[in-house]
Image: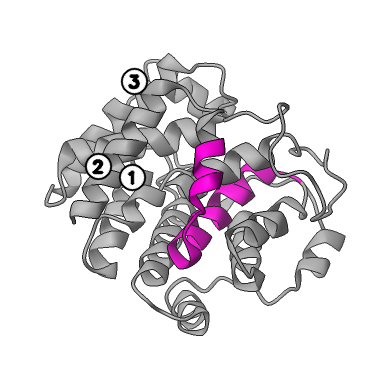
Amino acid sequence: MYGAILGDIIGSRFEFDRGGKTKKFELLTEEDCFTDDSVMTVAVADALMAAGVNASVDNIEKECIKAMKYWGRIYPNAGYGGRFWGWLFGGQEGAYGSYGNGSAMRVSAAGWLYDSVERTREVARATANVTHNHPEGLKGAECTAAVIYLARTGSTKEEIASYVEREFGYDFSETLDDMRRRHEHVESCMDSLPKALRSFFDGTSYEDTVRNAVSLGGDTDTLAAIAGAMAEGFYGVPQELKDRGDEFLESDMIGVIRRFEELNFEL
């Protein structure tokens, strides 16, 4: 979970190409902040803990709706997209067919709680389905959670890459330099997942992975949240960096993170 949240915070000040597409930058500054990526990551973790590890898909979806609306209304100014804002604060209850990268940036908790990749994917799909029920929105969430699961259970990057290509069909063959050159600000799973995957596969540590993602420009907070979540599964996150990240978060958010880490340790 910290992997996604710290990626979001680190990437926040560079969104909309404010970072010069470089890996050389101060990691955390007073200009950084958490955004909707962190709020919804906390919301999904809260929902999955409330549902329990053996919950049905229907119950997971109900808890996700409840938690997302609860947390979104506590932090209404976190930078939500227009359609998600309407879902949070309007009368709409059902999903709205989105293929935006929001389904992938919030899903990281699902990568940690379950004992098989199949169950991980089932839960990830449920967390997306309440809003992002377009096939690409569902796929983005499933892929992100599956990579986290495979990374934390000892798969090599080569094995993870093979799984992603076989199961999800993403083309992440472009180099990071290629991605920077063709860059545009796109907030879809179809654009963000290949970029996040390349950032992860080329990364040499958690920090290096996040720097890769931020250097691509555009939707840097979400790219770094997705890639950072994957990297946490593979490398972990240094405790010093977690401690620094807490300085940017509210106490109720930290409380959920602590409960999640304790539960994950017990499992």
Amino acid type assigned to the residue bearing label 3 in the image: Tyr
Figure quadrant of residue 71: top left
Disc assigned to residue 70: 3
Decide: few, some or many residues near mark 2? Use Cα within 10 Å; few <14, some 14-19, many ≥20: many
The answer to the question of whether label 2 and label 1 lie on touching residues, with beta carbons closer than 8 A, is yes
Q: Is residue 12 above or below residue 93?
A: below
Magenta-highlighted residues:
218-244
* Callout 2 secondary element: helix
Q: Secondary structure at mark 3?
A: helix
Location of mark 1 (residue):
127
Q: Position of residue 29 (x, y in %)?
A: 72, 33
- Residue 111: x percent and y percent? 35, 57
Main secondary structure of the magenta stretch = helix
Q: Nearer the viewer, mark 3 or mark 1?
A: 3
For marks 2 and 1, the one nearer the N-term is: 2
Left or right of 40 in this view: 199? right
Mark sitting on residue 48: 2
Q: Is residue 81 above or below residue 153?
A: above
- Say if the magenta span includes residue 226: yes
- In the foreground, 101 or 106: 106
How far from the left and from the top, in percent, is residue 101? 55, 47
Specify whether residue 164 is in view.
Answer: yes
| In magenta segment, residue 235 | yes
Type of amino acid under label 1: Thr
The residue carrying pointer 1 sits among few (fewer than 14), some (14 to 19) or many (20 or more) residues within 10 Å by Cα, namely many
Q: Residue at x 46, y 45 (%)?
A: 2
